[in-house]
Image (spheres, rainbow, N blue to C red):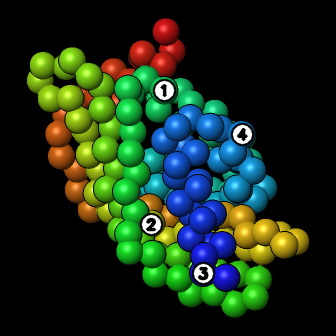
């Protein structure tokens, strides 16, 4: 069971980093509980995966590379529900920016999963922000690049 849960969690962030939106959506329940309030992103909400991913598509493709490094994964699970806690370091790069090419966000995730038939799916993501380093102007630049 732990291997399947780990593969869903790692597969989701790999799909986001490679911009494989269909694969990311296939690993999410509908609705999906998203809470980035600790980072100032507004209150937690239950949203359709397509709405979450559309929002991410308005920013993430504007970076040349993103990389979400998770670990260790602390998994608590029964037969139908799981909670995964993990530290995250999320690097976001735009190459060729003289005043700092990387913006890095540090924190942790509390991810919830449910068993959907034979498969596990992510049902929620609560991000617990710790700090950030690097060029904090990169998200705005990435958003304008993604819109172009």
Instruction: Give the CA distance from mark 1 to mark 2.
Output: 22 Å
Q: State the image coordinates of residue 21 (x, y, percent, origin top left).
A: 65, 38
Q: Residue lying furthest left in this view?
A: 99
Q: Residue lying furthest top in this view?
A: 148
**Label located before the other in sequence (1 or 2):** 1
**Residue closer to the observer: 2 or 135:** 2
Marker disc for residue 61:
1
Q: Nearer the viewer, mark 4 or mark 2?
A: 4
Label 2, secondary structure: give it.
Answer: strand
Give residue 77's quadrant in the image.
bottom right
Label 3, secondary structure: give it.
Answer: helix
Q: Nearer the viewer, mark 3 or mark 4?
A: 3
Q: Left or right: 31 with respect to 41?
A: right
Callouts 4 and 1 close, C-beta under 8 Å = no
Callouts 3 and 2 close, C-beta under 8 Å = no
77 relative to 130, above or below: below
Q: State the image coordinates of residue 32 (x, y, percent, origin top left).
A: 69, 58
- Residue at the spot of label 3: 2
Q: Residues within 10 Å of mark 1 (few under 14, many from 20)?
A: some
Q: What residue sits 29% from the left and 50% below the top?
A: 105
Callouts 3 and 4 close, C-beta under 8 Å = no
Label 4, secondary structure: give it.
Answer: helix
Q: State the image coordinates of residue 52 (x, y, percent, origin top left).
A: 63, 43
Q: Left or right: 120 with respect to 44?
A: right
59 relative to 50, above or below: above
Label 1, secondary structure: give it.
Answer: helix
Marker disc for residue 109:
2
Instruction: Give the CA distance from mark 3 to mark 2.
Output: 17 Å
Instruction: Give the CA distance from mark 3 to mark 4.
Output: 24 Å
**Label located before the other in sequence (1 or 3):** 3
Instruction: Give the CA distance from mark 1 to mark 3.
Output: 31 Å
**Label located before the other in sequence (4 or 2):** 4
């Amino acid at each position: 069971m732990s291997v399947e849960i780990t593969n869903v969690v790692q597969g989701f962030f790999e799909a986001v980093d490679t911009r494989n939106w269909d694969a990311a959506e296939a690993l999410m329940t509908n609705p999906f509980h998203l809470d980035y309030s600790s980072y100032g992103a507004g209150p937690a909400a239950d949203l359709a995966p397509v709405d979450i991913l559309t929002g991410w598509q308005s920013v993430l493709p504007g970076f040349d590379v993103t990389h979400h490094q998770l670990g260790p994964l602390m998994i608590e699970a029964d037969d139908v529900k799981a909670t995964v806690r993990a530290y995250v370091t999320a690097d976001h790069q735009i190459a060729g920016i003289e005043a700092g090419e990387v913006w890095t966000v540090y924190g942790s995730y509390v991810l919830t999963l449910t068993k959907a038939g034979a498969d596990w799916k992510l049902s929620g993501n609560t991000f617990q922000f710790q700090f950030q380093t690097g060029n904090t102007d990169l998200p705005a630049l990435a958003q304008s690049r993604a819109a172009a």
